[in-house]
Amino acid sequence: MADDVPSPPPEAPADAGRRRLLARAAIGGCACVGAATLLGPAGVALGPLFQGDDGPKDGLPVALGPVSAFKVGAPPVRVVLRADERDAWSTRKNAPIGSALVQRTAENVGRNVGFTVLSGVCPHLGCAVDYRDDLSRFHCPCHGSSFETSGARVETTEGGKPNPSPRDLDPLDYDVVNDRLVVTWVRYATATAERKKVGA
Amino acid sequence: MTAAGPRRGGGGAARRVLDGFEARTGLFGGVKTLLSTEVAGGARFAYALGGVLVFLFVIEAITGVAMAAVYTPSVAGAWGSLHYLEHQVVLGSLVRGIHYFASSAFIVVVVLHMTQALLYGAHRRPREATWIVGVVLLLALLGFGITGRFLRMDQHGYWDTRVATGVMGSAPGGDILKTLMLGGQRYGSEALTRFYALHVFVLPGVFGLLTALHLAFARRHGPKPRPGAKPAPSQPWWPYQTLRTVVLSGVVLATLIALTLLVGVGLEAPADPASAYEARPDWYFRFLFQLLHYLDGPLALLGTVVLPGLAVVFLIATPFIDRRAPGEGPSKRTLIPYALMLVGVATLTIVSFADDAGNERFQKAMAEADEATATAEQMIALGGIDASGRIPLFEGLELYRDKGCAGCHDGTKTPSPGLAGYGTRQRLEAFLAHPNGEAFFGKTPLDGKMDAVEAEGDARIALVDYLRSLGGHAEGSAASVERGAAAFVEDCTDCHNAPALVAGMKDYAVDAAGPDLAGLYGFEWTRAVVRNAGHVTAYGGSLDKDEAKKAMPSYEELSDEELSRIVTWLLAGAPGAKR
């Protein structure tokens, strides 16, 4: 004990109850102050569970050029989607936001007619799916998910392994405006059998 | 009370001050007590592993703070600031290299440290708490790995993180964790700042605290000598054990520096969500990645949750599974599962790398990724990175390739002008000399529409000076430009409007055969040509309607933004155009 602090007088037995009460008050005080301190930070940390996506609710329209660029019978192509993206506090003009797999299936085109337009995001874990002409299928380079050109999941992939993808490739809505293909970009949850929209 | 009492024979004012300081703080005594801890059975290199881990943590903290002095945790700033750190900041690439390789070394040394503890029985009574805290430290270490990669915001870090968080999200309840980590569903601004907060504040805090506990527990019981070792006298930590720890730390640091200099970390092209990048995790997560190749569908849960979960439970429970007395040799009950685990992880890792080495498609994709990185570097050297983190020339080149321009202009299958050096004086001179050469109008609908310029010497230079001045490039003297203008009016205005007339709109013929040259190779002029090359004021005047349509598509779907990027790139000389 430091030599400049006088020794305290012995505690009277009557003080024991008072000490217990004060201890309880101190614990309660700590809990209250602690909770009040953590309230705000907890809100910031857990907020995303209650907050929606920054993107437009109905998806982000992306113009892809004249429909004549896509020929019936040609293999699917992977196209880069560029759009003005809203990301938290910032907007980014003409940002590459994702990719789509596009194949024209009919001469007659219109709203959701005449094309197969699929999201290029693998439903398994979110890697980029591409068209493999040697397999005539869509193929994910990460774990080998494999899909027909219609987007339908195949049962066994290249090498006879079971397909890790829990569902078919996700179709994207599209429309033909002034002879130009406009795709509506939407992001879906990965690794779920059910198709769940999570943003755009 | 104080550990170091007043010394005799020291004398002098300095000594009195030091003694006074010691009497008030007890610091010297405290340090002395720490350093003189007895190492039972004598100092060993095996005991130095823990010290090396502390050293690695200090390295990570110091290099991390140094990097934080440059790194900018935003989508706009992350990649560019790392590029700056890597290429411009003095010793920046060394700091980053050490930080990166130290994280790998951390994993290696942790495994050695754990193995040594198991073999020596250092997990047994009374050191169980030390062991368990150690296992939690290992998990926190993996957390550093996951959060650190994304901060790079290059292709590798970005796609790895997508896969890693994808795995996390596929576990039951994992999507909540994933949402919390990403701050939503987007691999963008909020994900980056959250990963940053975790990597730089939360995890170091947790790791530091746990390390302090681990060390306090370890010190309480001292090192555990190898079972069956001959009894030997103990030695104080200082200097016997200290020296061994310092030597081993030096070896580790030398290895980190060598790896940085010989291998390097590298920074791939900026993250591009639209690319078809082949994602692979860092080596210490490869086993999990590979495991998911075999376990899919309902079995995937086995790979993402059950097996890793069992491994963690096993490690935490090791002290209780092991029933042997503290002084006995290793127990088969713990050593066999532990060895199987290590062998399994090592095998999966090796198989994963071997698969990729033998996979031509993957090798090609990696080569493409390297090429993209080299191109980004080249475009930065020419045109820099703008404040919003974009590389204008890189984006221009990508649009040139994506939008179909390269389809004609990069090859010779469809006759079209080559664009290399677009907008430069050299290309203009070459064009005037051979307008119908293959690099220009040759074989296109414009073939033969313009004659080569015959002027020689100064007259030729004057003409080029004049033409360059139209787009605002003041390259020749006023006299030369004037002389060139006179020659232009004399020889060229049969087809081209004399640009000098444009201002007054006098004698301006909108249907002049040749392109309007006002603002030639300026931004607006080039923009108008790309937007509609077949327009009468561009190349359409010399072609009939059908030819004009065929000449070059008008690319109406290009947004103004995209068009501007392409023009900026073109006027930088179209770097990266194949011809």
Image (tube, grey):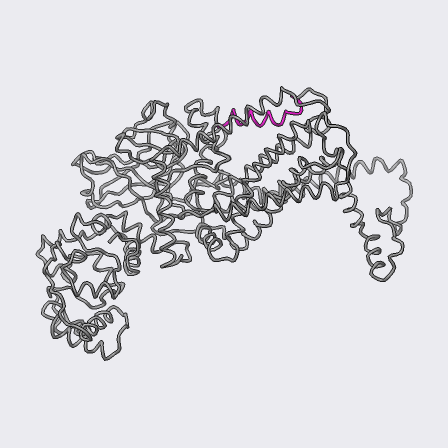
Is residue B220 visible to us here? no
**Residue B451 found in image quarter:** bottom left
Q: Residue furthest left?
A: B544
Indicate whether residue B41 is drawn in magenta: no
Q: Position of residue B371 (x, y in %)?
A: 35, 47
Task: Relative to B67, say whether A52 is above or below.
Answer: above
Q: For the point 27% across and 29% down, which residue is it?
A: A135
Residue B34: give x, y in percent of width and height: 76, 43
User: Can residue B386 be seen in the rendering of this structure?
Assistant: yes
From the viewer's perspective, tell me whether residue B267 is left or right of residue A9.
left
In the displayed structure, B183 sits above or below B570; it is: above
Q: Quadrant of the C terminus of chain B?
A: bottom left
- In the rendered structure, does residue B313 fall within the stretch colored magenta? yes
Total marks shown come to 0
Please provide percent x and percent y for residue B475: 28, 72
Q: Residue B375, how many percent across, how many down?
A: 35, 51
B52 vs B142, left or right, is right
Q: Nearer the viewer, residue A198 or B481?
A: B481
The chief SS type of the magenta part is helix
Q: What residue range appears in magenta?
A: B304-321
B428 is higher (above) or lower (below) than B223: below
Q: Nearer the viewer, residue B525 or B175?
A: B525
Quadrant of res B368: top left
